[in-house]
Amino acid sequence: MASQKTKFVVGLFLVSGIGIALLAFIWLGMSRYFEKGRYYVTYFNESVQGLDKDSPVKYRGVSVGRVVSIGVAPDSKLVKVVLKIDTGMALDTNIVAQLKSLGITGGVFVELDQKKKDEPDLSPPLSFPSEYPIVASKPSDLTQIFKGIDDVISKINALDLEGISTKIKSNLDTIEKTV
């Protein structure tokens, strides 16, 4: 038979073990809430497929934070991306956010960079207030390439190819008759 003292020590060991495990569980779960950093929001007028919660936020290739949440903006047209900047860096009005690809994996991250002089503001217009400071955004390189291709195709479609070919044919006929 176990003595009273042994039962007490085993009980004390169990209670303290459970207490320590509970404290560790709470500490690990709450550690994100005690992280320092500043929150910002940016709005994209394009697909953010491949961008996930906890995706990196980089400033010229250097990791400065992470994506906290992704959702649809209050106007139901834009995509709202909340960023948490962990470094002491404060984002001013000269910073612009852009989606960048991580390679062939399909992963995406948010790239922050200085807005170039004479660069137009390509951010989508907002018709609602924001709870965090807003970082301007610009379309991703891939979206800009597709937009350029669409512009070229629309200009080609706008050409009067039939009229041009008719004029060329009549000019060639005139040259042929003259020769």
Image (tube, rainbow, N blue to C red):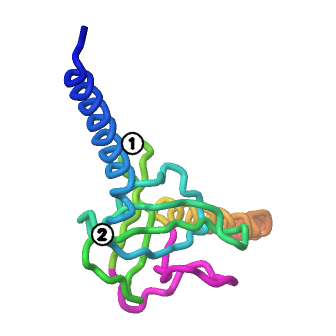
Q: Residue furthest bottom?
A: 118
Task: Say which quarter of the image contains residue 59.
Answer: bottom left
Of callouts 1 and 2, the N-terminal one: 2
Circle 1 residue: 104
Residue at 79 percent across and 68 percent down: it is 163
Q: CA distance from mark 1 to mark 2?
A: 28 Å
Task: Specify the quadrant that holds the C terminus.
Answer: bottom right
* CB within 8 Å, label 1 to label 2: no
- Decide which of 129, 122 is in the foreground and name it: 129
Figure check: 7 above or below 153: above
Q: Secondary structure at mark 2?
A: loop
Residue labelled with disc 2? 86
Give amino acid for label 1. Ile
Helix, strand or loop for disc 1: loop
Would residue 121 be visible to someone looking at this image? yes
Look at discs 1 and 2 and give the one toward the viewer: 2
- Magenta region: which residues? 114-139
Specify the farthest residue to the top: 1
Q: Main secondary structure of the magenta part?
A: loop
Q: Relative to the observer, which residue lies in front, 95 or 163?
A: 95
Expressed as whole percent of the image width and height from the top left, the position of residue 174 reads 74, 70
Q: Position of residue 35 (x, y in %)?
A: 32, 65
Q: Position of residue 178 (x, y in %)?
A: 70, 71
